[in-house]
Image (cartoon, rainbow, N blue to C red):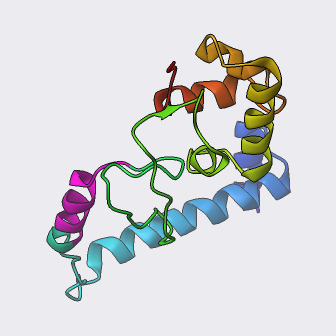
Amino acid sequence: MKLMKAFNNAFGFTPTESKVVLFLLAMFVLGLAVKTFMPDRGAARFDYRESDSVFARRSAEPVVRAGAVAGPESARGPFGGRQKKVPPAVDINSATKEEFTALPGIGGALAERIVLYREENGPFRSLEELMNVKGIGRKKYDQLVPYCRLGK
């Protein structure tokens, strides 16, 4: 007990704190002894070559975003679902509702609003005019621009 009091006085610990410190020190020494003196027991090593080849194969595949397919054929999405085919570019002055719904982020209601806007205001004079349609803000516009063109 005199040793514990001397330890507490030397380091300024309370009796509880000194017990915790001694316990942690004992566990550290025990862990060090186990690691040093216990045999390795042939721990199984994981062979990463197969998973590396799968990663390399998947990395070489084209990136598909927001329902768009890189090629003309349909493909599986990142979660296994079918994705819509997207035409290279849609003429916003002559596209039908069905052609608009093929674009990423455009549903039936928004496609209908685009067609109605075009019928009420005449042909689009610029792609930026799409942002006048309710439901198309800057973010949606930036998503659509690669798939739209201005014709006629």
Where residue 27 sits: x, y (%)?
55, 68
Q: Is residue 30 magenta?
A: no
Please tell me whether residue 121 is drawn above or below residue 102 in the rendered image.
Answer: above
Q: Quadrant of the N terminus?
A: bottom right
Between 76 and 126, the one nearer to me in the picture: 126
Task: Decide if residue 73 is on the left or right side of residue 147.
Answer: left
Between 21 and 130, the one nearer to me in the picture: 130
Where residue 123 sits: x, y (%)?
67, 19
Between 74 and 152, the one nearer to me in the picture: 152
Kindly give the residue lying farthest to the top in the view shown.
Answer: 125
Task: Decide if residue 48 is on the left or right side of residue 118.
Answer: left
Please tell me whether residue 144 is drawn above or below residue 38 in the rendered image.
Answer: above
Residue under the image location 70 percent in, 15 percent down: 129
Task: Decide if residue 34 is on the left or right side of residue 95.
Answer: left
Q: Is residue 60 magenta?
A: yes
Where residue 83 sits: x, y (%)?
49, 62
Where residue 142 sits: x, y (%)?
59, 25
Between 19 and 71, the one nearer to me in the picture: 71
Q: Quadrant of residue 133?
A: top right
Residue under the image location 73 percent in, 19 percent down: 122
Task: Decide if residue 10 is on the left or right side of residue 14.
Answer: left
Q: How many marks?
A: 0
Instruction: Give the overall secondary structure of the magenta segment.
Output: helix
Q: Which residues are magenta?
A: 51-63
Residue under the image location 57 percent in, 47 percent down: 99
